[in-house]
Amino acid sequence: PILRYSEIAAQLRDRSSTMEDTAYGITRFICGLAKKVLLANYCCTVADKLLAAQSLGSLSVVGAWLGVVMYAFQIYFDFSGYSDMAIGLGRIFGFKYSENFNHPYIARNITDFWRRWHISLSSWFRDYVYIPLGGNRCGRARQLFNMLVVWTLTGFWHGASWNFVIWGLWFFLLLMVEKLMGRRALQRIPRIIGIPVTFVLVCVGWIFFYFTDLSNATVTLQTFFGLGGREFIDDTARLALFNSLPLLLVCIVGSTPLFAAVGQAIEYNAHNRRISAATYGLPSLVYNTVLLALCVVSLVCSTTNPFIYFRF
């Protein structure tokens, strides 16, 4: 997460590292490592194979959807995993960092998505760009101009390339529409409709985030929506979907609060029944050990595992 000095100033002067903090930090670090190594890396393999430039000419509709969705999960688990590892390491040494992700793929609209995705970056641009420009304290036209500036800069933040500028302007357009609709209109949209529609709109943005070549982005976007006379599904997409279906299901569940809810329920039940710390800690120890072992095996078998956000 992007930390501000004011958030950790007191902790720099006076902090303590307890066994509880250390245990939490180790678990959080291993969970972040698993997100990166066991999910993001394998999502990357599927996405890169389907969205390779030489494959776009024969890409089917299902292939485009699977490739873009896998890239969406790759970038989420890569970056949220990186954030989890940083938060976990900080906790081991007594630092309590703010959360950077809050299950963004269950957002009901784009405004909600950006309250959940890369929270520290969104709040940084809000406090240091949007509010100094006038924020919401001025007229509607000036508010939209302020948003345009913010999202143009957000695109440039990720890279000096036109695809990132278009990515930023895409989200500006969506947020502008939602602002003109009003908060009450957005709240009336049922969650069962809002979540999948938001996810599709976010995936459209990820297409421009993935391709630096705008012609490749355009071809993928057309195929994504079934334009250009492409097949609905071909043998390549069928095989990729069959092989990656378990991974896809884990990614879908992992991007929801389900795992966190189960962990909280177990912790609550343990405290409520006054189970000893040693007994309660045993499942956590087994969980961490198995997960770490799987990560090590995966890393040993891989050649390189760079974090995707290191490019930005």
Image (cartoon, rainbow, N blue to C red):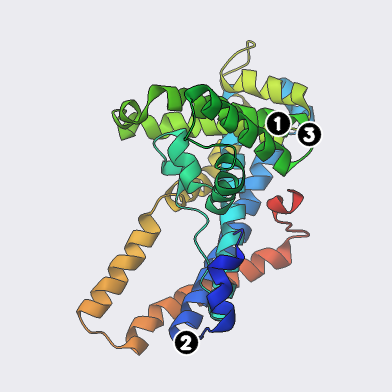
Q: What residue would you read off at disc 3? A: 161
Mark linked to residue 165: 1
Q: Position of residue 83 (x, y in %)?
A: 58, 61
Residue 10 appears left or right of 59: left
What SS does tag 1 mark? helix
Type of amino acid under label 1 = Val
The Cα–Cα distance between marks 2 and 3, rounded to whole angstroms, is: 46 Å
Q: Does label 2 or label 1 sit earlier along the sequence? A: 2
The Cα–Cα distance between marks 3 and 1, rounded to whole angstroms, is: 7 Å
Q: What residue would you read off at disc 2? A: 18
Q: Residue furthest left?
A: 273
Residue at 42% x, 77% y is 284
Mark 1 and mark 3 in contact (Cβ < 8 Å)?
yes
Q: Position of residue 265 (x, y in %)?
A: 28, 66
In this view, the residue in front, 67 or 213, is 213
Inspect this view and state whether residue 236 appears.
no
